[in-house]
Amino acid sequence: MAAVGLSLRSCLRGALALPGQQRAWNSGSGADQLGELGKGAGKGGGGGGTIREAGGSFGKREAALEERYFKEKEREQLASLKKHHEEEISHHKDEIERLQKEIERHKYKIKKLKDDD
């Protein structure tokens, strides 16, 4: 789980650190830059495999499935990252509570020492 968080963090860090570049990169679907996906090799769709190279409806369907797959993976990664941050927040709140109890304990000891004088 830690490795997934690390790799996810490194992937998202660049995208989140430079919002202007992210918008330029994510300004639409890949069709803007590559032509229409699934159109086949040499027609702006690139050579993504034999089905995609053939173009036509099978190529378009393959491109759509691929896009859906990557969007789902991204959704899963973001959910995992959100869960990780929520766990971190919970841990830090628990740590704050523990440290506040320690502070009160030390204050009580100081007060008790003053009272003994």
Image (tube, rainbow, N blue to C red):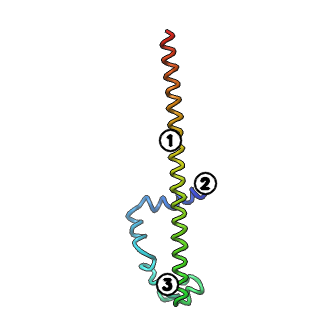
Tell whether label 1 touches label 3 (CB within 8 Å).
no
Q: Residue at x 44, y 80 (%)?
A: 31
Q: Nearer the viewer, mark 3 or mark 2?
A: 2
In the rendered image, residue 59, in percent from the top left (x then y), is placed at: 54, 86
Q: Amino acid at mark 1?
A: Lys
Report which residue position mark 2 lands on.
2
Q: Nearer the viewer, mark 2 or mark 1?
A: 1
Q: Amino acid at mark 2?
A: Ala
**Most foreground residue, 47 or 73:** 73
On screen, residue 26 above or below 43: above
Report which residue position mark 3 lands on.
45
* Chain-order first, disc 2 or disc 1: 2
Report which residue position mark 1 lands on.
93
Q: Nearer the viewer, mark 3 or mark 1?
A: 1
Q: Amino acid at mark 3?
A: Gly
How far is disc 3 from disc 2 in space, using C-alphas? 37 Å
Label 1 neighbourhood size at 10 Å, few (<14), some (14-19), many (20+)? Answer: few
**Most foreground residue, 67 or 86:** 86
* Chain-order first, disc 3 or disc 2: 2
Label 3 neighbourhood size at 10 Å, few (<14), some (14-19), many (20+)? Answer: many
How far is disc 2 from disc 1 in space, using C-alphas? 21 Å
How far is disc 3 from disc 1 in space, using C-alphas? 50 Å
Element type at marker 3?
A: loop
In the rendered image, residue 100, in percent from the top left (x then y), is placed at: 49, 32
Name the image quarter holding the N terminus: bottom right
* Chain-order first, disc 3 or disc 1: 3
Q: Residue at x 50, y 26 (%)?
A: 104
